[in-house]
Image: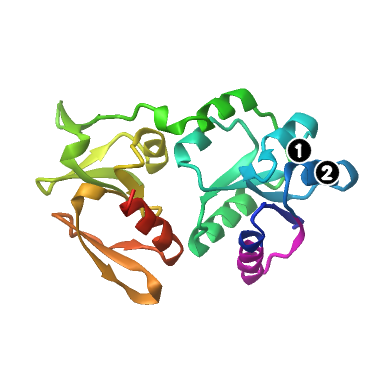
Amino acid sequence: MNVIIIEDEKPAARRLNRMLNDLNIQVSTMLHSVQEAIEWFQTNEHPDLIFLDIQLSDGLSFEIFDTIQIKSAIIFTTAYDEYALKAFKLNSIDYLLKPIDDDELEVAINKYKENYPQQKPIQVDFDDIKKLLINPLDRVYKKRFTARVGQHLKIFTVEDIECFYSENKGTYLHTTDNRNYLIDSTLETLEEELDPNQFYRVSRKFYININAIKDIISYTNSRLQLKLNTFNEQDVIVSRERVKDFKNWLEK
């Protein structure tokens, strides 16, 4: 597998390189800007897989596609809120939210191996993506969610919800009165809909409401364990890679 990294933060690129080496994947090239990437693609065979940061030192990485028809599969790495990624009309496999988690990296690699044996040409609606990435704070987020209870629909405001979580291929919301409801959604869809100032995705399984946090406890391997006001069915763990970003979120 021929893999390259396009990332303007060299420490982040080196860290990702080490993580891939731990998965027995060798990175052939690391590039650090839009212009450097364009020049490289013009003179080199395109790789099987690209790890691509969205914001590079000289612009958005999507500008590469304005000049070069990329034939590689892409895994995006980003510090942007995940909602913006839903606009991508690209040949992407997955995205990884910085700081990158080891387990999530392995999941993304496995998805690539399973689903993309053939390379496909990429098409991108860059204008739509750019609109979403500009002024993200101007977005309007959902204030209410519904869940089916028998023949009825029950309405919940975001203030009613302590957390969203996935279990057995279903997505649930947990309410402040200690009840769980299956909803017709996924955590990935919720990434577009939840206010990032109020909800934080601590792992692939959990979105938590900042107002529901009762206690934060140091956990093994430099992680954090969250105690919510009523939810106690599973451990809610902030991974080591997300601890710094989580602490910053708490102080916004």
Looking at the rendered image, the disc whose residue lies closer to the viewer, 2 or 1, is: 2
Q: Position of residue 82 (x, y in %)?
A: 46, 41
Magenta stretch: includes residue 29: yes
Q: Label 2: state its secondary structure.
A: helix
Q: Label 1: state its secondary structure.
A: loop
Kindly identify which residue carries mark 1. Answer: 70
Within 10 Å of disc 1 (Cα), the crowding (few <14, some 14-19, many 20+) is: many
Within 10 Å of disc 2 (Cα), the crowding (few <14, some 14-19, many 20+) is: some
Residue at image x 31%, y 73%?
A: 219
Which residue is farthest left?
177
Classify 106 as above or below 167. Answer: below
Between 180 and 40, the one nearer to me in the picture: 40
Q: Position of residue 102 (x, y in %)?
A: 52, 64
Residue 106 lies in quadrant? bottom right
Kindly identify which residue carries mark 2. Answer: 41
Magenta residues (range): 14-30
Circles 2 and 1, Cβ within 8 Å, touching? The answer is yes
Tell me which label, 2 or 1, sits earlier in the chain: 2
